[in-house]
Image (spheres, rainbow, N blue to C red):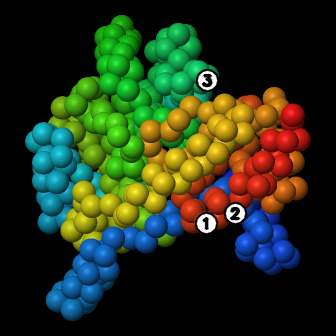
Amino acid sequence: MYSEKMYELGSRRSVIREIFEFGKKRIAQVGAEKVFDFSLGNPNVPAPQAVEDTILELLRTMDPAQLHGYTSAQGDAGVREQIAAALNKAHGTHYTGDNLYMTVGAAASLCICFKALAVEGDEFLTFAPYFPEYKVFVEGTGASFRVVPADTENFQIHFEEFERLISPRTKGVIVNSPNNPSGVVYSEETVRRLAEILREKSAQYGHPIYLIADEPYREISYDVEVPYLPNYYENTLVCYSYSKSLSLPGERIGYVLVPGEAEDSKEIYAAVCGAGRVLGYVCAPALFQRVAAACTGMTSDLSVYRRNRELLYGALTDLGFSCVKPQGAFYLFPRSLEPDANAFCEKARELDLLLVPGDGFGCPGHVRISYCVQTEMIERSLPAFEKLAALYR
Ligand code: PLP
């Protein structure tokens, strides 16, 4: 016998993956020039030169047994100190390496945090629209997952719904800003109000409610400051990843930050180490721990995403799409031109435009368009968007 639950998860592809696989098939049939794949959040901009330089330098100068050997489970001490110093410089904080636990990307950071925090009966809340894997990761720990419906006017937080859903069972609240899929950055006002409610409810329920800040898009923002959540709410754990900022998603590197200000900080950090152990991570990739440390604070050339955002947002709004202008990440999340986003995406697919329905992100009636693609592909896709819009005139 095997686990029905795992079978269920493993035998069904995610909607995004399914669309991506369809795209590959279509490319084989009609050619890459004629397929417009906006499905995946796979950065198309190369990693900064410093990544290659650091790898070559490490290969030339480090003892291979050390370079490729296991590090401490929580990550190489020097790496963690270097990242802590970079964070302190950027955010005026006082972290040390002992606040950091290196991981295999944000997905692992999240799984480790949920596993470290969850006890029987706990609940984790998030705000729609949200990254669909949260549900899988939270439920994988045995905790319950609940979604606060979206504020579809501006994709900030729907506070009335949040106050309705938060309960004594709430152990953690997951936030993702800049957001996948809406591209929205939570404003300082939103963050302050969120922190206020969390403090009030923690006091009322007699236990801390942790804020889990999922931050793979922190550096990808357009003309706005992205509030650094630990500076607004002490019980914040940060799940960071270098996948998007350095265009290294396949190298699997990130960290969990447990600030000293968080309640039971030392115990939570130990529980994070325990969770990493139970999940069999052993240690994060040794070479890329060192690359991440050397390149913390750098980014790929983000001007490409800015250009793509302007081009696509302008073209779609001209065609009559209604869309909150994204301030970060590399996604647009317009309303679909009919209430059923799945039916809309089917029509788009017939024009070889591959878009993702918002239902999986907890936000029906919208579609996600990932613009971390070549600008030329966006330009080539515009007639297809025009044809799609014309179907609804
Ligand atoms: N969180 C969000 C919001 C994401 O969009 C992604 C990846 O797309 C992840 C987490 C996982 O990132 P990683 O590749 O670092 O595991």
Quadrant where the image shows the C terminus: top right
Q: Amino acid at mark 3?
A: Thr
- Mark 2 closeness class: few <14, some 14–19, many ≥20 residues within 10 Å: some
- Mark 3 closeness class: few <14, some 14–19, many ≥20 residues within 10 Å: some
The residue drawn where x is 80% and y is 41% is 389
Q: Which residue is mark 1?
A: 376
Q: Is residue 298 visible?
A: yes
How far from the left and from the top, in percent, is residue 223? Answer: 35, 40
The residue carrying mark 2 has its beta carbon less than 8 Å from ligand 1: no
Q: Is residue 90 above or below residue 289?
A: above
Single out the mark in the foreground, 1 or 3: 1
Gap in angstroms between the C-alphas marked 2 and 1 = 6 Å
Q: Nearer the viewer, residue 199 or 220?
A: 220
Looking at marks 2 and 3 on the same chain, the residue that comes earlier in the sequence is marked by 3
Q: Tell me, yes or no, whether the two marked residues, 2 and 3, touch with CB atoms within 8 Å.
A: no
How far from the left and from the top, in percent, is residue 281? Answer: 41, 63
Q: Residue furthest front?
A: 318
**Does dot 2 land on a helix, a strand or a loop?**
helix
**Does dot 1 land on a helix, a strand or a loop?**
helix
Q: Which residue is mark 2?
A: 380
Q: Is residue 97 visible?
A: no
Q: Amino acid at mark 1?
A: Glu
The residue drawn where x is 85% and y is 76% is 29
Q: Tell me, yes or no, whether the two marked residues, 2 and 1, touch with CB atoms within 8 Å.
A: yes
The residue drawn where x is 49% and y is 22% is 157
